[in-house]
């Protein structure tokens, strides 16, 4: 292990220097209630729009063009990512005209919202509300390159550095209500950059990893922040956390390779939300398609208040072999500045098309403490029982780490992770399955 550590670290730093952009961060959606300037403009005379015209909803659609979260950012998302996330760097507010009364608004779980009072000035008429960021671009592009350095602390595995994501995004505003969006990228393989020469695999060509995750047109800017989109879509089920190895993502069936063809409609006013989708998946000719053939439906609904969020999700997939895949469960979150907490609980029933089915349970908890802008401590707990018919086959995973955003458009996330099989609550008496140190890095534009 030691002889691979320093080569791995050097390779990681060189490779990660190229990284751009991150996936969706649900904790940011919860925490954004504490940074009112993302949605509201100063001074204190901004006009409070009618309910049907309000855009802030404390969810993924505020910061991302895709309702599923992740990918290309909206002007609000760019502003939040550059203004509120990094420790150091140039902030868009530096390019904005001086305000007469620049009092910061804020939210406190016990005291509520304070700092701004509605006035008469429509926010859309303030041309520099996002500083040097175009508030309504006709064309926009971005990229996301993410990588990981993996250092196992047990026997039988090897250190490695590998790309997790390499995506390019583009969007065009075709009319006031119509927008086109595309997400094209490459899949990754840990074996591609294995640091142990004996375990290096033959490297396939880049075309073997080509994928098109999302390609859709969206009819948006409807009353109550409504939209309809059709094409290649990413699912909107549950918390779309950046760690796609989490049990509630990959093992539940919503990993990084999951997309489908369909139509989706949603509403996101202050503060309830709802969306429903009909879809078909499994077209073998589509670049990056890995899902089994079938058709289904999904729906999500809930409420996103300034201090808390609660909702539910349901997903039904009828497979071509006759099997039925059902997933259902609640999700929730709390914003108690400087602490945010999010959780999810899911039940999955997967039928094999021959009359038998396997029931599974999944749970996820994440606690973040924002010590300083650009520095947050993180504690995560993953739990999965892959089959309710068997005893002691469940898995517990605990991870501790930090999210560090030292400079604009760049973030690092080192963490230590342990996984146990079986045992009691929080893995007491369980068998250690793995423990490792991982370092993820990404930047974005």
Image (tube, helix red, strand yellow):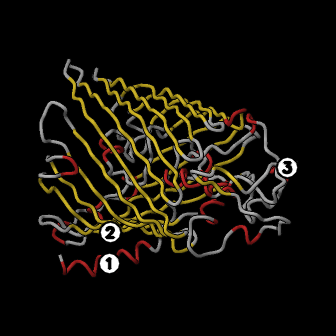
Left or right of residue 316: residue 338: right
Q: 10 Å neighbourhood of mark 3: few (<14), some, or many (≥20)?
A: few
> From the viewer's perspective, is 317 left or right of 312?
left
Please state if 437 lies on the left or on the right of 238 as rendered. Answer: left
Q: Is residue 46 above or below residue 201?
A: above
Residue 413 versus residue 396: which sits nearer the camera? Answer: 396
Q: Label 1: how many residues lie within 10 Å, few (<14), some (14-19) or many (20+)?
A: some
Residue 119 visible in the displayed image: yes
| x, y percent for residue 149 | 32, 69
Numbered mark located on residue 164 in the image: none
How many C-alpha atoms fall within 10 Å of the one at disc 2: few (<14), some, or many (≥20)? many
Image point 43% across, 50% down: which residue?
Answer: 241
Which is more N-terminal, label 1 or label 2?
1
N-terminal of the pair, mark 3 or mark 2, is: 3
Question: Where does the image place residue 445, in percent across and percent down from the top left?
Answer: 58, 63
In contact (CB < 8 Å): disc 3 and disc 1: no
Determine which quarter of the picture holds residue 402.
bottom left
Residue 193 visible in this rendered orientation of the protein: no
Q: Are marks 2 and 1 in contact (CB under 8 Å)?
A: yes
Residue 207 horizontal/vertical position (percent): 40, 54
Q: Secondary structure at mark 3?
A: loop
Q: Which residue is mark 1?
A: 9
In the image, taking residue 39 as reference, residue 286 lies left or right, namely left
Q: Report x, y in % for residue 275.
A: 55, 31
**Disc number lying in front (3 or 2):** 3
Nearer the observer, disc 3 or disc 1? Answer: 3
Report helix, strand or loop for mark 2. Answer: strand
Q: Contact (CB < 8 A) between labels 3 and 2?
A: no
Label 2 sits on residue: 149
| Residue at numbered disc 3 | 119
Which image quadrant for residue 175?
top right
């Amino acid at each position: 292990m030691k002889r691979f550590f320093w080569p791995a670290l050097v390779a990681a730093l060189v490779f990660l220097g190229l990284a751009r952009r991150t996936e969706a961060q649900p904790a940011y959606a919860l925490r954004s209630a504490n940074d009112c300037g993302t949605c509201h403009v100063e001074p204190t005379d901004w006009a409070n729009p009618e309910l049907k015209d309000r855009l802030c909803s404390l969810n993924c659609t505020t910061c991302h063009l895709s309702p599923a979260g992740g990918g290309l950012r909206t002007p609000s998302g760019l502003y939040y990512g550059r203004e509120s996330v990094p420790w150091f760097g140039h902030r868009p507010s530096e390019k904005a005209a001086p305000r007469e009364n620049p009092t910061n608004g804020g939210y406190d779980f016990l005291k509520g919202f304070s700092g701004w009072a509605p006035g008469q000035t429509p926010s859309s008429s303030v041309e520099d509300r996002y500083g040097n960021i175009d508030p309504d671009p006709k064309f926009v592009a971005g990229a996301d390159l993410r990588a990981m350095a993996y250092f196992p602390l047990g026997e039988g595995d090897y250190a490695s550095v590998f790309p997790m994501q390499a995506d390019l995004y583009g969007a065009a505003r075709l009319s006031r209500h119509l927008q086109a969006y595309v997400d094209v990228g490459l899949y990754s393989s840990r074996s591609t950059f294995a640091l142990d020469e004996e375990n290096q695999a033959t490297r396939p060509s880049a075309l073997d990893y080509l994928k098109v995750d999302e390609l859709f047109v969206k009819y948006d800017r409807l009353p109550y922040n409504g939209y309809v989109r059709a094409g290649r879509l990413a699912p909107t089920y549950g918390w779309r956390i950046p760690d796609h190895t989490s049990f509630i993502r990959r093992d539940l069936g919503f990993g990084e390779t999951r997309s489908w063809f369909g139509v989706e409609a949603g509403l996101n006013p202050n503060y309830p939300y709802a969306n429903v989708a009909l879809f078909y998946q499994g077209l073998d000719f589509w670049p990056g398609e890995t899902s089994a053939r079938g058709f289904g439906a999904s729906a999500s609904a809930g409420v996103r208040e300034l201090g808390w969020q609660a909702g539910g999700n349901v997903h039904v997939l009828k497979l071509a072999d006759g099997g039925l895949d059902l997933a259902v469960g609640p999700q929730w979150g709390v914003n108690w500045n400087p602490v945010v907490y999010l959780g999810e609980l899911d039940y999955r029933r997967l039928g094999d098309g021959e009359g038998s089915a396997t029931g599974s349970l999944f749970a996820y908890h994440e606690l973040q403490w924002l010590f300083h802008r650009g520095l947050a401590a993180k504690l995560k707990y993953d739990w999965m029982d892959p089959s309710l018919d068997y005893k002691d086959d469940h898995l517990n995973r605990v991870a501790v780490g930090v999210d560090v955003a030292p400079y604009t458009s760049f973030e690092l996330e080192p963490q230590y992770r342990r996984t146990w099989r079986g045992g009691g609550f929080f893995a007491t008496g369980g068998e250690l399955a793995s423990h490792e140190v991982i370092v993820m890095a990404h930047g974005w534009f």
